[in-house]
Every structure is written in C-alpha cells, then in structure tokens.
Amino acid sequence: MILIVGLGNPGSEYERNRHNIGFMAVDEIARKYDFPAFRQKYKGHYAEGSIKGEKVALLKPQTYMNESGRSVGEVAKFYKIPTSDIIVFHDELDVAPGKLKIKIGGGAAGHNGLRSMDDWLDNPDYKRVRMGIGHPGDKDRVHGYVLGNFPKSDDDWLEKLLAAVAKEVPVLLKGDDAGFLNNVARTTQPPKPKKEKPEVKGEEGANG
C-alpha cells in the first residue's frame, strides 16, 4: 500500500491558507477517485481506496503542522509502510506559485511538517511533492504569508493545478516523477501564442 499524505492545519479557519495546499491536493485526489469519506483515525483524517489498481491510503494529519509526523508515523508503523512508499504533498515557499518540484529525502528546509515527519519516521527518504506558493520577499513576512489565505485572484491557477495533480497521480504512483511533472505542467501552463506567419507579397507583373 502507498501512503499519500497532505500537510496542513486542521479547522475551517485554516482551510484556504497557503500552508494547507497539501490538504487541498489530497481532498482533490479523494474526490477524483471516489474514495470513501475520511474517518478520524491515526490522529488524522484517513481513507483507503484504489487508484488505477494500486491500493492507496490518504492521510491528512489533524495534529497541527508541527506535529504532523505523529499521525504519519502511526499509519506507517501499523501498516508497515516503508518510507519509500510514502508521498507527501506540501507547500513550498521557494517554488513559484502553480509550479511543482519533486524531491526524495533531504532536509526539511524550515518546513515544520517535514521536520516532524523526519522525527517520527525511520528515515527521511520519502517523496516530497513541493507545491509552489511563492515567497513574500521578506523573511519577516513568511509566517503571516503561509498562514494567509489564497486570494480569489489565485483561484484560476490553483483549481487547474489541483485538478491536474489528481488526474496525473497514477503516473506518480508508478514512479515516473518526470512524467508526472511534465503532464501537470502541460495541463496547467497557458498555451503559447501562435506566431503569425510573415505575409508573403506576390511579385508584381511587369508592364508591357
């Protein structure tokens, strides 16, 4: 079984926070593939289902971001899921809004949810899907920025991104990270404007 984790904070007041884009991604995956309703289990909201024949567990830890690892660790331990079969979706300040990057292992880079997961799992070599939210430009504004809501003006790219992530997640489950990123990018990027062909002027006939 593969465990897909979305990181965020519980409660309606945090629902549209940039920090909760991981929850949003998991909710869209659950909707797309008709998962049963989430249940309160393992200190999180938990659901099991199937994606293109692959058994998958979805988890949204309800322990607040800085204790996310408690919930993830419980599920991984109970089902004996190796870290190589854990995929986490989380917000990423250092990636442009609407863009994705994938990383396996490495440091938490200041992300409290990842830091907690590192503390509770056997090793940090799980797959991180880094969902870009952009940077406010000043480190003193980071806290308020990540806990701020996505403005309505972001809805267009955000909805397209979440839909594309859910649609292409079977590619990710197969281990084709590059294919997943390419497919999402192709779906979410606006079409390039067509270059107009230069007008070819016909030769004028000579006067007789």
Image: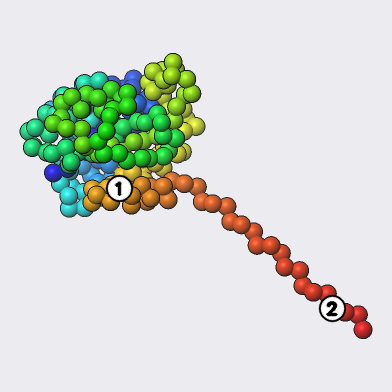
Q: Residue at x 28, y 27 (%)?
A: 108
Q: For residue 90, which quarter of the picture?
A: top left
Give the CA separation, mark 1 to mark 2. 60 Å
Residue 102 appearing in the image: yes
| In the image, farthest residue toward the bottom | 208
Q: For residue 62, which quarter of the picture?
A: top left
| Amino acid bearing label 2 | Gly
| In the image, farthest residue toward the right | 208
| Element carrying mark 1 | helix
Q: Nearer the viewer, residue 60 or 133?
A: 133
- Which of the labelled discs sits on residue 177, or is there none? 1
The earlier-in-sequence mark between 1 and 2 is 1
- Mark 1: few/some/many CA within 10 Å (<14, 14-19, 20+): some
Left or right, residue 145 beside residue 73: right
| Colour option used | rainbow
Give coordinates of residue 181: x percent, y percent.
36, 47
Give coordinates of residue 30: x percent, y percent.
25, 40
Q: Nearer the viewer, residue 130 or 16?
A: 130
Give coordinates of residue 54: x percent, y percent.
17, 50
| In the image, farthest residue toward the top | 140
| Quadrant (top left, top right, bottom left, bottom right) of the C terminus | bottom right
| Amino acid bearing label 1 | Asp
Q: Residue at x 20, y 27 (%)?
A: 118
Give coordinates of residue 20: x percent, y percent.
33, 28
Q: Is residue 177 above or below residue 63?
A: below
- Mark 2: few/some/many CA within 10 Å (<14, 14-19, 20+): few
Residue behind mark 2? 205
